[in-house]
């Protein structure tokens, strides 16, 4: 049988450094299907996409993007503008998938810190009621479901939390957030015992960190939009 033709993939970002890093990763020979030669990068703002109207007949994926977009008067204004832009650029039967944390409640801030409390970054949870309403008004077909159902994630899987990562970073260079328990214990056999890493289940109230008020993984939603 002929080898299936690989689809074209375009990444959009405001950051040239991020686009360059993505290019290096996708061109590596270690990629599961080899280097992705049909990749291209596009300097783009999510609230003002540099794309022609009805020009996208494939899939647009915005994974953990919309929590970083602008807030205005308590509303996810940037996310709502992205919905309008998607309605404009999608061709008939074109689709978009937006994944982020939130639900049917008002947006709230989430303060994220790097090691030792440096590099503060604030994200905002998403009020999916507003996004669904905007998409319906724009004539898009809308479906919403928990992200773990969409990707068939096993919430019983034990993996590194933010708390585990902060503990490890006091003694070692590591980027192991959400790494599976087996990988963490293999890479850091001594430290994982000495530091008493929790490595909680993805569905645990103590993930992503020991102070989480509820299971964070269950708060991630997937909004599927299709142009009719």
Image (cartoon, grey):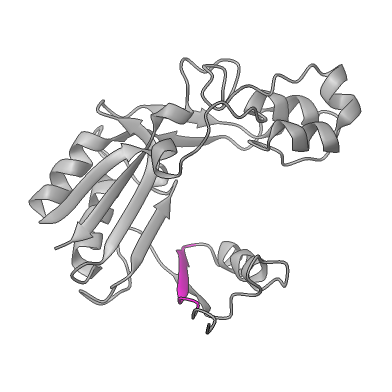
123 drawn magenta: no
Count of all numbered marks drawn on residues in the image? 0
Q: Where in the figure is residue 39, as x and y percent of width and height?
A: 53, 76
* Above or below: residue 190 compared with residue 224: above
Q: Is residue 78 above or below residue 200?
A: below
- Most extreme residue toward the bottom, as rendered? 2
Residue drawn at the location 56% of the way across and 26% of the way down: 156
Q: Residue at x 23, y 48 (%)?
A: 80
Residue 120 placement: quadrant:
top right
Q: In the image, what residue occupies the spot 63% across and 36% down?
A: 178
**Which residues are drawn in magenta?**
6-14
> What residue is drawn where x is 44% and y is 46%?
64
68 or 63: which is nearer to us?
A: 63
**Residue 99 occupies quadrant:** top left
List the single residue furthest toward the front: 1
Instruction: Determine the image quadrant of residue 176.
Output: top right
- Does the magenta run of residues contain 9? yes
Residue 194: give x, y in percent of width and height.
87, 18
Closer to the camera in the image, 228 or 127: 228
Horizontal side, residue 66 vs residue 113: left or right:
left
Q: Give above or below for 77 relative to 103.
A: below
């Amino acid at each position: 049988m002929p080898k299936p033709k690989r689809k074209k993939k375009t990444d959009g970002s405001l950051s040239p450094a991020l686009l360059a890093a993505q290019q290096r990763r996708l061109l590596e020979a270690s990629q599961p299907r080899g280097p992705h030669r049909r990749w291209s990068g596009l300097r783009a703002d999510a609230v003002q996409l540099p794309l022609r109207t009805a020009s996208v007949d494939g899939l647009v994926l915005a994974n953990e993007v919309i929590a970083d977009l602008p807030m205005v008067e308590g509303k996810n204004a940037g996310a709502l503008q992205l919905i309008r832009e998607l309605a404009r650029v999608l061709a008939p039967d074109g689709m978009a998938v937006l994944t982020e944390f939130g639900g049917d409640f008002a947006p709230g801030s989430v303060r994220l810190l790097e090691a030792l409390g440096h590099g503060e970054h604030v994200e905002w949870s998403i009020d999916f009621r507003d996004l669904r309403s905007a998409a319906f008004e724009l004539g898009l077909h809308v479906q919403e479901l928990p992200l773990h159902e969409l990707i068939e994630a096993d919430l019983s899987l034990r993996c590194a939390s933010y708390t585990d990562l902060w503990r490890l970073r006091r003694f070692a260079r590591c980027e192991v957030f959400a790494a599976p328990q087996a990988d963490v214990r293999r890479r850091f056999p001594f430290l994982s015992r000495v530091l008493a890493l929790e490595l909680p289940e993805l569905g645990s109230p103590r993930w992503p960190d020991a102070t989480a008020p509820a299971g964070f993984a269950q708060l991630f939603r997937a909004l599927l939009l299709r142009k009719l």
